[in-house]
Image (tube, rainbow, N blue to C red):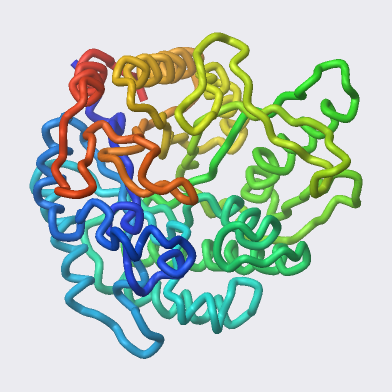
Amino acid sequence: MRNKDFLWGVATSAFQLEGSPYADWSTWDSIFSLNPKITNHYELYREDIRLIKNLGVNSYRFSIEWSRIQPSEDYWNKEVVRHYQKIINLLNENNIKPMITIHHFTHPVWFITKYPWHKKKSIDKFMEYVERLIENINNVDYWLTFNEPYLLILGGYIEGCIPPGYQNLNLALKAMKNIFICHRQIYDLLHLKNKNSMVSIAHNMAVFAPWIKCNPFDRLLAKIAKRFYNHSIIEGFMDGKISLPIPFRKTMEIEVPIKGKLDFFGINYYTRVHMRFNPLRKLFIEFRHRDIDGHGLTDMGWEIYPKGLKKVLKYASKLNVPLIITENGIATKDDNKKMKFIKAHVDVIENAISEGIDVRGYFYWSLIDNYEWLHGLDARFGLYRVDFKTYRRIPTKAAAFYSYIINSRNFRS
């Protein structure tokens, strides 16, 4: 029998299942003009909750799409808020704990155009939305304020490959500080409303290794990446300061008011990345994947590296708060590969728990196939396959296998 306190779940995000004509990403990727409803989850949520229940999970992580609620700056769509509350109520009726992500990459077009994150006014505008949302959403204990804020900053402010599309390090630092100010304010608001609130962020962590071990530049880049991407945010929650080493430049430091503002730590883990020094690339960095241990690569070319999950759990345990794997999944059309992936990572969690690491939950990404940022509809992460023309959900062998895993493990959280 499994421990009922351990959170077994699946994770999704609203925009990746539903789309939204009012979101910045709808203007960023032409796929939304061809398939605006993506999986049509907005209308088919009852069917999808039945799929969740059939898996035997006891929790479901999902996001609320801000641009649907506030499609224009001065309009608040009460019906959409009621829609998300219906999802929460249905989950609770089925003994499935909702875990809500407030911000999962997307913004209303009006917000990102007039109040991008590097502007001080972004705090006021975002918090106006969040305060009203929290007032109107009930019966939720688990909250994630932001999904992968570092990826939002890296992609939106340094690489410029996702909205808002800037390439400016100084603006990136301002945006990061403003996002973490919002995290602190949301944390306090949620605890004022509900003393049982469990609040965190979902932080993407990876393992970094040198492309060529004997190359000192590759080794240096791997060390810098680990400190920048994995460690700095953890130190921010521990002492209120984030130190960001930039390759071959001075380390940047920002003060963030997030010390202790964490009830658990959400970890999204997928892969190991090899760092290669390349003088022709921006910041001299080239990211590469290679299959060293024989687990293979995903359909997106990412290395499958289960052992890395133990490494990031071990480091994150320095926070002295419970750890929850808020995302872990594989893009593949091969059901056997998906099953092996799930088992290998759950085995690592079991081992970590046996060694005293306080892991309280595991959420597979994703319940059903969805839109993958910058990759379209071909990255098949789902336990249920989706026919994007008919919106039919098709169970995979991995769905039944995940149910078996849940019922066969007895984690002591």
Residue 330 spot, x, y in % from top left: 41, 29
Counting the numbered discs, the total is 0
Residue 238 spot, x, y in % from top left: 65, 46
Residue 298 spot, x, y in % from top left: 47, 26
Q: Nearer the viewer, residue 352 or 146?
A: 146
* Residue at x 67%, y 42% (from the top left corner): 229
* Residue at x 21%, y 79% (from the top left corner): 78
Q: Is residue 191 left or right of residue 403?
A: right
Location of residue 243 with respect to 366 vertically, above or below: below
Residue occupying the far bottom of the picture? 74
Q: Quadrant of the C terminus?
A: top left
* Residue at x 30%, y 29% (from the top left corner): 6
* Residue at x 26%, y 43% (from the top left corner): 60
Q: Is residue 393 left or right of residue 36?
A: left
> Splitting the image into 4 quarters, where does residue 271 fall?
top right
Q: Nearer the viewer, residue 150 or 108?
A: 108
Location of residue 307 with respect to 242 vertically, above or below: above
Q: Quadrant of the N terminus?
A: top left
Q: Is residue 386 left or right of residue 262?
A: left
Q: Residue 64, can we see it? A: yes
